[in-house]
Image (tube, rainbow, N blue to C red):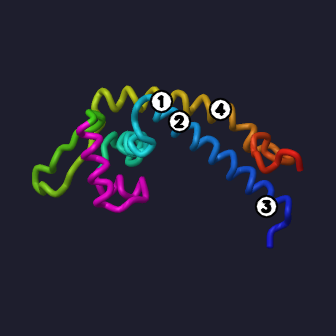
């Protein structure tokens, strides 16, 4: 079993990562999209390096089932966040692209997330705190 200090560092790192993820989810919701829609936009824009992605690539990025991602993409199309383009040779091949609205939302969320990551960057590498400050179970012990 790893040493206690190693486990404390891993636990502290996991806690800070989860705090960031919660922050990112709240930013997405504040802009009236779901965290899953934000992740979809991020995957379309950045996962492949092409600026678009297929449903299969998005399923891998999101670690979701193909049919669930199809539904997520369709809801995003209905919200005007992404557009689909079928392949010319194989109509089963679907490219997903961001719309202007999707680009704008992703930009706004990403700017806030990057600022938050910069603020957390040094904190993540610090020694773990004795206890997280805002954990109700830790009060009075």
Q: Residue at x 65, y 32 (%)?
A: 118
Question: Is 56 covered by the magenta stretch?
Answer: yes
What are the residue bounds of the magenta stretch? Answer: 54-78
Residue in the foreground of this view, choosing between 78 and 83: 78
**Is 134 a magenta residue?**
no
* x then y, percent, for residue 99: 28, 32
CA gap, disc 3 to disc 4?
24 Å
The label shown at residue 7 is 3
Q: CA distance from mark 4 to mark 2?
A: 18 Å
Disc 1 from disc 2: Cα separation = 6 Å
Q: Are marks 1 and 2 in contact (CB under 8 Å)?
A: yes
Mark 2 — residue? 26
Which residue: 34% across, 32% down?
102
Magenta: main secondary structure: helix
Toward the bottom, the furthest residue is: 1
Tell us which disc is closer to us: 3 or 1: 1
What's the mark number on residue 118? 4
Task: Using the image, tell me which numbered label, if any, was put on residue 30.
Answer: 1
Badge 1 density bin: few <14, some 14–19, many ≥20, Cα 10 Å:
few
**Element type at mark 2:** helix
Q: Regarding mark 1 in the picture, which secondary structure is present there?
A: helix
């Amino acid at each position: 079993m790893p040493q206690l200090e190693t486990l404390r560092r891993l636990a502290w790192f996991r806690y800070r990562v989860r705090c960031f993820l919660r922050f990112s989810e709240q930013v997405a919701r504040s802009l009236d999209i779901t965290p899953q829609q934000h992740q979809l936009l991020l995957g379309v824009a950045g996962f492949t390096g092409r600026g678009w992605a297929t449903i299969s690539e998005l399923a891998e990025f999101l670690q979701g089932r193909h049919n669930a991602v199809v539904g997520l993409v369709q809801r995003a199309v209905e919200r005007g966040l992404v557009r689909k383009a079928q392949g010319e040779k194989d109509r089963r091949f679907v490219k997903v692209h961001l719309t202007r609205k999707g680009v704008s939302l992703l930009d706004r969320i990403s700017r806030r997330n990057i600022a938050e990551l910069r603020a957390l960057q040094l904190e993540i590498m610090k020694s773990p705190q004795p206890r997280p400050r805002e954990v109700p179970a830790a009060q009075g012990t």
